[in-house]
């Protein structure tokens, strides 16, 4: 790759497991899609925790999407970075309700799963040294905990196209001209 194209990334193509884990540990926001009871898609941004196998999501007790996931656990999500070299992870999966609108501490005195995720994972990652200030204010409200188990995980890195998108007949031939000269009509 030329020095000029360095901004496009050093690698093109799928990420391996270590690269996925490293990328998903970053400060990115997931965009999650589920279905409303009327069949329309519902898309929302959310913090997430990736444990190397599944995504963990923590909606507030009154979040509409928590109820949508209980009714229909099919979910898709994407995590991507906005600037080159452009990395992304796209997940199609099943949302499993681990906790339904519980407080930060369970009746037995243990921390709820969502409270552990917020305390040890998402809070520090997204808020840094402001985590205690923020969590102190909101850590009294009940939340849900969902584990999104991927059925399909698609990854990409680098600012380039996958080969499946390329039309061989439009690429330059031996003479430097495309094999086919298409006519485009507006």
Image: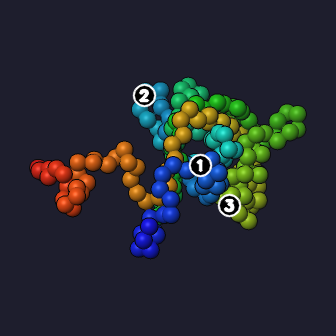
- 184 in relation to 64, above or below: below
Mark 3 or mark 1: name the one nearer the start of the chain.
1
Distance from disc 3 to disc 1, alpha carbons, whole Å, reads 28 Å
Image mark for residue 16: 1
Name the spot of residue 24 as percent of width and height, x first: 61, 52
Q: Which residue lies furthest to the bottom in this view?
A: 3
177 displayed left or right of 5: left
Report if the CB atoms under discs 3 and 1 are less than 8 Å apart: no
Measuring 11% from the left and 50% from the top, which residue is drawn there? 183
In this view, the residue farthest toward the front is: 174
Q: Residue at x 46, y 70 (%)?
A: 6
Q: What secondary structure is found at the residue carrying circle 3?
A: helix
Q: Earlier in the sequence, mark 2 or mark 1?
A: 1
Secondary structure category for the residue under label 1: loop
Residue to which mark 2 is pinned: 39
Mark 1 burial class by Cα count in 10 Å: few <14, some 14-19, many 20+: few
Q: Please say if 168 is above or below 34.
A: below
Crowding at dot 3, Cα within 10 Å, few <14 / some 14-19 / many 20+, comes out as some
Q: Name the residue under label 3.
A: 127
| Coordinates of residue 52 in the picture (x, y in percent) | 68, 44
Calculate the distance from the C-alpha at mark 2 to the C-alpha at mark 3.
Answer: 35 Å
**Residue located at (82% from left, 41% from top):** 111
């Amino acid at each position: 790759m030329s020095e000029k194209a360095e901004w496009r990334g050093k690698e093109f193509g799928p990420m391996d497991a270590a690269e996925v884990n490293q990328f998903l540990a970053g400060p990115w926001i997931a965009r999650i899609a589920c279905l409303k009871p009327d069949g329309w898609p519902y898309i929302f941004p959310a913090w997430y925790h990736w444990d190397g196998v599944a995504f963990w999501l923590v909606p507030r007790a009154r979040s509409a999407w928590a109820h949508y996931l209980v009714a229909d656990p099919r979910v898709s999500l994407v995590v991507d970075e906005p600037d080159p070299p452009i990395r992304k992870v796209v997940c199609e999966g099943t949302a499993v309700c681990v906790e339904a609108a519980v407080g930060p501490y369970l009746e037995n005195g243990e921390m709820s799963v969502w409270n552990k995720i917020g305390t040890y994972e998402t809070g520090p990652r997204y808020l840094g040294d402001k985590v205690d200030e923020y969590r102190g204010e909101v850590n009294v409200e009940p939340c849900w905990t969902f584990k999104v188990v991927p059925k399909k995980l698609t990854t990409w890195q680098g600012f380039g196209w996958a080969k499946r998108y390329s039309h061989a007949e439009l690429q330059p031939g031996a003479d430097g001209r495309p094999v086919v000269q298409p006519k485009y009509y507006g």
